[in-house]
Amino acid sequence: MNKTVFFEIKEWEKSYLRSKLPNFNLQFCSQSLNEISAGNAGDADVVCLSARCVMNEKSIEKMKKLRYVTTRSTGYDHIDRGVLKKMGVLVSNVPNYGDNTVAEYVFALLLSVSRRVCEAESRTRKRDFYSRDLVGYDLKGKTIGVVGTGNIGLSVINIAKGFGMKAVAYDINENKEASHDLGFDYISLEDLFKSSDVITLHVPYNRSTHHLINMKSIRLIKRGSFLINTSRGKVCDTTALLGGLKEDIFAGMGLDVLEEEEFIRGEKGSPVSRFLRDRKMIFESGALLNDKRVVVTAHNAYNTKEAALRILDSTADNILAFKRGNPVNLV
Ligand code: NAD
């Protein structure tokens, strides 16, 4: 009998999915996908993942009957699509469940660092009511540089306009209509680095965006700027982020994603050797966690009640479409 296995699923999501897929043989696994938990999907033809589930060759090997993978996320860099393609396994994502959700979070992070909200809050909790040294930074009149003008990037520009900010953008595929309608200019990445007071990243993680923020780019970035990353950790070289903070190129950073965040969370069912190889990265990410100018959250930008329901609705639609022989949202 065909079987669909969901990884890293919460209790309330089970009943919701059962109501959406009533005639399906569904199995739920609260654990994330790793080389060990993959055994739960040994006889499944459909597997559903969260963005935290790492689907590599080793876990795929255990899924002998696999025909379709759907991820409850927009990003799909956690899935080894090369291996799946060779096996003829299709992969879908949820492309636009939370343009506003992630864009709103960008401003939660930005205001936290630009207005030093976390420091002020932490002092107040300790009954320290002195805050005159916590001088902030106005957004009105400043330039926001948006890297990647897909669904989320455009939503960020829309919100930035409400703050009275000027927006510039860089994308390998320019959206002229949006540029006209929202009133922003496309410029080169180099010019964006040089002219932006706030840089915010909204590109997928792939070979072309690996370490887009690196030692070379921080030499171009305007001194005293803010960096917000809600895309993927590996879009930034952690060493460069630390270098930029050390040299006061960055006045602050809001990071929802970190390089090697799965190691930091202790989720990657990884052999010790790989852990040792990556320990430098973990150490550097730890240094980011300890810097007061940096606000770090654990991949939480997508996480609202409304977005969670949109993700489950689209996921159920993806599975139904695949079963009908007409798969959608393929990546
Ligand atoms: P999207 O596909 O709508 O937009 C991505 C944009 O990036 C596209 O316009 C594309 O042309 C552009 N792009 C691709 N490669 C580029 C490059 N090398 N240089 C410049 N531009 C490039 O995606 P989206 O919905 O806006 O999401 C963006 C990313 O945000 C996702 O891929 C995902 O990694 C991340 N995300 C994170 C969370 C979170 O919770 N932190 C939630 C949702 C999405």
Image (spheres, rainbow, N blue to C red):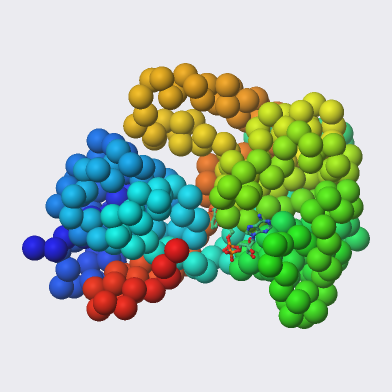
Q: Left or right: 176 with respect to 96?
A: right
**Front-most of residues 111 and 143:** 143
Q: x and y percent of residue 289 in the render?
A: 63, 30
The answer to whether 211 is drawn above or below residue 68 in the figure is above
From the image, which quarter does the N terminus lie in?
A: bottom left
Q: x and y percent of residue 268 in the render?
A: 39, 34
Residue at x-position 49% and y-position 30%: 264
Is residue 203 visible in the rendered structure shown here? yes
From the image, which quarter does the C terminus lie in?
A: bottom left
Is residue 286 visible in the rendered structure shown here? no
Q: x and y percent of residue 167 in the render?
A: 82, 64
**Front-most of residues 294 and 216:** 216
Q: x and y percent of residue 201 in the render?
A: 68, 52
Q: How many numbered marks have been drawn onto this rendered protein structure?
A: 0
* Residue sitting farthest toward the front: 86
State which image quarter holds ligand 1.
bottom right
Q: Left or right: 306 with respect to 67?
A: right
Residue at x-position 91% and y-position 60%: 141
Residue at x-position 76% and y-position 60%: 170
The answer to whether 54 is drawn above or below residue 185 in the figure is above
Residue at x-position 40% and y-position 59%: 72
Q: Left or right: 27 with respect to 266?
A: left
The answer to whether 291 is drawn above or below residue 232 in the figure is above
* Residue sitting farthest toward the left: 1
